[in-house]
Amino acid sequence: MPSSGLELLWQVAPQLGRGAIQTLAIALAAILCSTLGGLLYGVLGSLGRRALDALLRFYLELFRAIPLLVWLYLFFFGLPLLTGVSLSSFACAVLVLSLWGASEVGEVVRGGLQSLPRAQREAGLALGLSTWQLYRLVLIPQALKRMTPPTINVYTRLIKGSSLAVLIGVIEVIKVGQQIIERTHEHVLIYGTLFVFFFLICYPLSLASRALERRWSYA
Amino acid sequence: MSALIELSGFSKRFGDTQVLREIDLRVERGEVVVIIGPSGCGKSTLLRCLNGLEIGEGGLQFAGEALDAGSDWSRVRQRIGMVFQSYQLFPHMTVLENILLGPLQVQKRARAEVQAQAEALLTRVGLGERAGAYPRELSGGQQQRIAIVRALCMNPEVMLFDEVTAALDPEMVKEVLDVILDLADGGMTLLIVTHEMAFARAVADRILFMDEGRIAEEGEPQAFFSAPRTARAQQFLERFSYLQNVPRRK
């Protein structure tokens, strides 16, 4: 047995590192997909088409009402039964987190876009901008400031949510920690390390959010 | 040659409210038409229908081309400049970026050429030094002059002015109206919605008086302002002359 906590940490570092990479890979992929999906959701939701709004609302409520854990099981165990397609546990975790994240980021984007004066849209259209140009050049850049803090909040929830992937068999950082604890019974040390790990990832994100907010503080 | 803008039996409704009723109107190239009338008479909606911000029913032609909901409005809007009451500059862009946006992104023109034109126009409206400023750094009157330049830089064939001085402090109204007068002198086709009666009289070739979604009366400014024919126009003008000359309290 290692004599001190530091020695133990040094020994298990490679193992924890591999777990951490899994966690970060899931989170990063989910963040990327949530952002792209959320932008699409938000833009579609700001067009004011009633049928589209109802569809997006249904999607949002589905992911708000049903726990992520249930979605994970549904995709991991249900999808192969229903369609014959089976996804790896990693892909499944990314997919479920992305679908959830896209609806949450999407609501943020939609709210940000709708908060802009209606006449800004008209001023853009009057210049002959296409809808795509209007959103890309005029509306989204203006809404960014308002959208950034709540979006980063969703990102940190995605990072923390990635630990659910353990339940469909992904060996991410918390699972690795638990395996080490089973061997060494060093609960406090390992969970303390995990605490520091998540804090070190999520805290800079909220710092970045505040810095961006300041940088974009025009108007 | 056909009129630049031609409306025939043109109507617009919002839900149950009929905002425009069977409007017939021809605007020739180079003509300055000023539209006046009480709030809610449909004059702003009329302007907004001309560049497709609202879609109505009935005949609408621009330079001989019939327009409806299915038209390529982006192409038409490049030929119709519009200036709004609340300026609506894009706050995240500098003055120059605001002006270049349409010419570069929509018309795909060369930056050097557009920038030279933008700078010339800025100088013409007395704002040659403010190209790098952000809208929030400018007064309302300055922002509105920039908004006019932004529309002009697309080289439109007509300019629509929708109550462009209504949000301005009185001391800034003149600087904006001077720019519009300058455009009129240059032969630009203008459609102007305004509550500035003295200005309407000074700039217009023709006055349209709208009431309840109809063109209730139209005519040359001299005749219209000195001897309006309809009771509604008389009432409307009396209220304005009262404001020019409020009696001293006892």
Image (cartoon, helix red, strand yellow):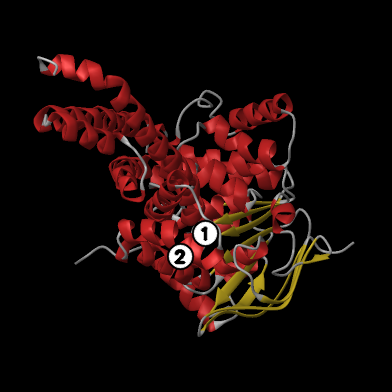
Q: Residue at x 30, y 66 (%)?
A: A65
As shown in the figure, which amino acid type bears the numbered disc 2?
A: Leu
Give the answer, above or below, for where B140 lies relative to A180.
Answer: below
Check disc 2 and report the residue beneath it.
A56
Residue that label 1 marks: A44
Q: Looking at the image, can residue B169 be seen?
A: yes
Most foreground residue, B136 or B183:
B136
In the current view of this chain or complex, which residue is farthest to the right? B1
Figure quadrant of the C terminus of chain A: top left
Q: Is residue A218 left or right of residue A153?
A: right
Indicate the chain on which mark 2 is placed: A
**Left or right for B182, reference A5:** right
Q: Earlier in the sequence, mark 2 or mark 1?
A: 1
Residue at mark 1: chain = A
Residue A28, percent from left and from top? 41, 36
> Are there few (<14), some (14-19), or many (20+) residues within 10 Å of tag 2?
some
Question: Is residue A108 depicted above or below B245 in this figure?
Answer: above
